[in-house]
Amino acid sequence: MMLKLDMKKAYDMLDWECLEALLKKYGFDTKWCGWVNACIRTVSFSILFNGEATDSFRPSRGIRQGDPLTPFLFILMSNALTFLIDKVVANYSLKGIKLNARCPVLTHCLFADDTVIFGKADYQEAQKIIDLIGEYGAITGQEVNINKSSVPMSHATSKIRS
């Protein structure tokens, strides 16, 4: 089984507290964490409405697209999913796939805001992946964009009949 997931408004949804915790987990000094927090938390926006700028407001989460720091922060945040997947694999709840006998097990691939998760095509493993994605969303603020996500099937996959 393969699930291709797209994260909804990936940069806009990032939870700042989770990001700070991940920075600390990776060993970033308190001073560095403070600098990153200053970059992401001191942002303010205003909107042009009928040619007039509204009062400025501050976001409560998310990181700005176009900021040179943003891709690195998003990659750090995406690694939270890797931590969760590795934990589930260690408990033998997610099997992944092997491309051949000499390859390591492949459980997931991450690219920008797209994630591909591989597993055995059965109910238990599918449920474990759903739970995992829910836990990741609760921790990081990320949500799966169902409209841009898919579960591609092989022509060899048998159809389930009800």
Image: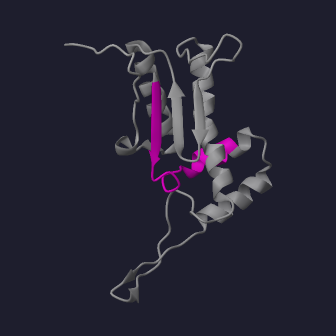
Compared to 47, does 118 lie above or below? Answer: above
Which residue corresponds to the image point at 64% horizontal and 46% vertical from the top-left?
75
Span colored in magenta: 2-22
Quadrant position of residue 35: bottom right
| Residue 37 position within the rendered picture, expressed as x and y whole percent measured from the top left | 66, 59
Q: Position of residue 42 (x, y in %)?
A: 60, 68
Residue 11 belongs to the span the image colors magenta:
yes
| Residue visible at 70% across and 58% down in the picture | 36
Residue 129 vs residue 28, the one in the foreground: 129
Q: Is residue 27 above or below residue 69?
A: above
Q: Name the residue at the left extreme.
A: 162
Q: Quadrant of the N terminus?
A: top left
- The structure residue drawn at horizontal position 41% and vertical position 22%, both measured from the top left corner, is 154
Q: Nearer the viewer, residue 159 or 127?
A: 159
Q: Which residue occupies 34% across, 44% down?
A: 147
What x and y, as percent, mark residue 5? 46, 38
Would you say 98 lies left or right of 138 here? Answer: right
